[in-house]
Amino acid sequence: MTEALCAARMAALHALCFETPRPWSKTEFASLLTGPGVFTVGDEHALAMGREVAGEVELLTLAVHPAARGKGLGRITLDAFERVAMTLGADTAFLEVAANNPVAISLYTSAGYRESGRRRGYYLPASGVAIDALVLKKLLKAT
């Protein structure tokens, strides 16, 4: 599979999964994939993309195809993301999630993530009503 095809598949899945924040384009995925420390896990049903830098990893996105939800793929993909992050040397993980996304928040908190901050009005959807972003953190392994 070529990088461009990967980026196209990622963008297609992302478009099915997101309105807020807005879905990323094929060009944006392709650009991210060339960045240092960037990695992905998953397939056309569920994917996670992260970036590891200096012992910390940021979950850039996690997407599960709408037809595949409720089957544990989010947790499986998150677990795979964390395993890869640890092999790359990360001991702490961070992510942002829209405060109005209870399903994602439940997944992350049940996996051990805790709120470490809040970005007020971070997301601005088409409705024009700003949505806070919760910043969540998890220690992946003992330091």
Image (cartoon, rainbow, N blue to C red):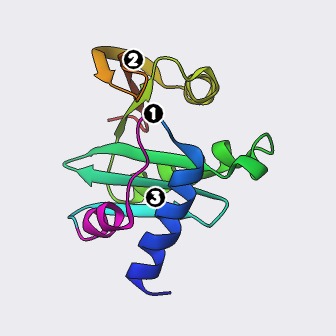
Q: Is residue 49 magenta?
A: no
- The residue pinned by badge 3 equals 84
Q: Which mark is residue 131?
A: 2
**61 over 1 or under it: above or below:** above
Quadrant showing the C terminus: top left
- Of badges 3 and 2, nearer the viewer stands 2
Per the rendered image, the range of residues in magenta is 21-34
Q: Would residue 78 be visible to someone looking at this image?
A: no
The amino acid pointed to by label 1 is Thr
User: What residue is shown at x 45% (from left), y 62% (from top)?
Assistant: 40
Q: Which label is found at residue 78? A: none
Q: Residue at x 39, y 80 (%)?
A: 4
Give the CA separation, mark 3 to mark 2: 30 Å
Q: Position of residue 70 (x, y in %)?
A: 79, 39
* Circle on res. 20: 1
Nearer-N-terminus badge (1/3): 1
- What is the secondary structure assignment of the residue under circle 2? strand
Residue 58 x, y percent position in the rendering: 33, 43
Q: Residue furthest right?
A: 71
Which of 39 and 30 lies nearest the eye of the viewer?
30
